[in-house]
Image: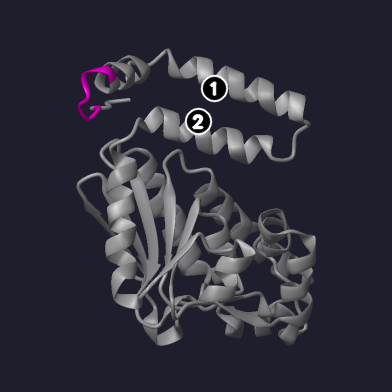
Amino acid sequence: MYQTILLTTDGPVGTLTFNRPEKLNALNVQMLQEVAQALAALRTDPAVRVLILTGQGRAFVAGADVRQFLEFDSRRAYEFARQAQEVVAQLEDMPLPVIAAVNGFALGGGCEVALACDLIYASEKATFGQPEINLGLMPGLGGSQRLARLVGKGLAKDLCLTGRAVSASEALAMGLAARIFPPEALLPECRRLALELAAKSPFALGQIKKVINAGFDLPLDSALEMEAQAFGLCFATPAPQEGVQAFLEKRAARFSA
């Protein structure tokens, strides 16, 4: 049913692959719509507990398809940015962990998509950047905001104002990537982590995501209150009972919630 992405599931792990390799997986309106449809479908599939995003070919996503910009006026550009931001926000708000397996170029919109994921794992050959300034533009899918929140204002301004690209090792050093791997090990390592996460309580994982994301910009007292409420909600599920019992019995926990 999809023409620009691939969506597969293998046990508790879903994989969404950007699939326009001839265009380096550049984002266009159709791809954004298909990603939104896929994310909506995954939300209603309780069997999928972790999602991996990656790209077909040499790129994760090499940015937006800039040819469409030739037809934009100010209003159309605004509408495109807001539509794209909504899809990226939908990704960020997924109730399950999302891993970006950045296999190549993650530039512009591609970097912004990765920033909305919970964990960014990268190939040693990956490249990150926000090069929109080189087209007389600026980031429009959240890069100016999520990047600053992740690596700090100084580094975010460095990347957005200069448009320079950074290697996987520099991305790791600045905190943009969590880990880097040889190209052939990237997807196996991401899947290994995904299976590790899938064995944990899905409710607790979702609460951790929610509290970190929502609490980041709140005053500390408010964020701590949110954390305490989420901690309490975990006890409305059987997960803590199973987890503690498994710990005491020295066995692997089997979480259903």
Q: Is residue 69 left or right of residue 208?
A: right
* Residue 107 image-quadrant placement: bottom right
Asked if the residues shown at circle 2 and circle 1 are in contact, with their CB atoms under 8 angstroms apart, the answer is yes
Q: Residue at x 52, y 72 (%)?
A: 28
**Which span of residues is magenta-colored?**
248-253
Q: Is residue 1 visible?
A: no
In the rendered image, residue 252 lying in the magenta stretch gets the answer yes
* Residue 254 image offset from top left, x and y in percent: 23, 27
The quadrant the N terminus occupies is bottom left
Residue placed most toward the observer, 161 or 182: 182
Count the marks: how many? Answer: 2
Which of marks 1 and 2 precedes in the sequence?
2
Q: Which residue is mark 2?
A: 207
Q: Residue at x 37, y 57 (%)?
A: 52
The quadrant the C terminus occupies is top left
Q: Is residue 187 above or below residue 73?
A: above
In the rendered image, residue 107 lying in the magenta stretch gets the answer no
The kind of residue tagged 1 is Ala
Q: Which residue is mark 1?
A: 230
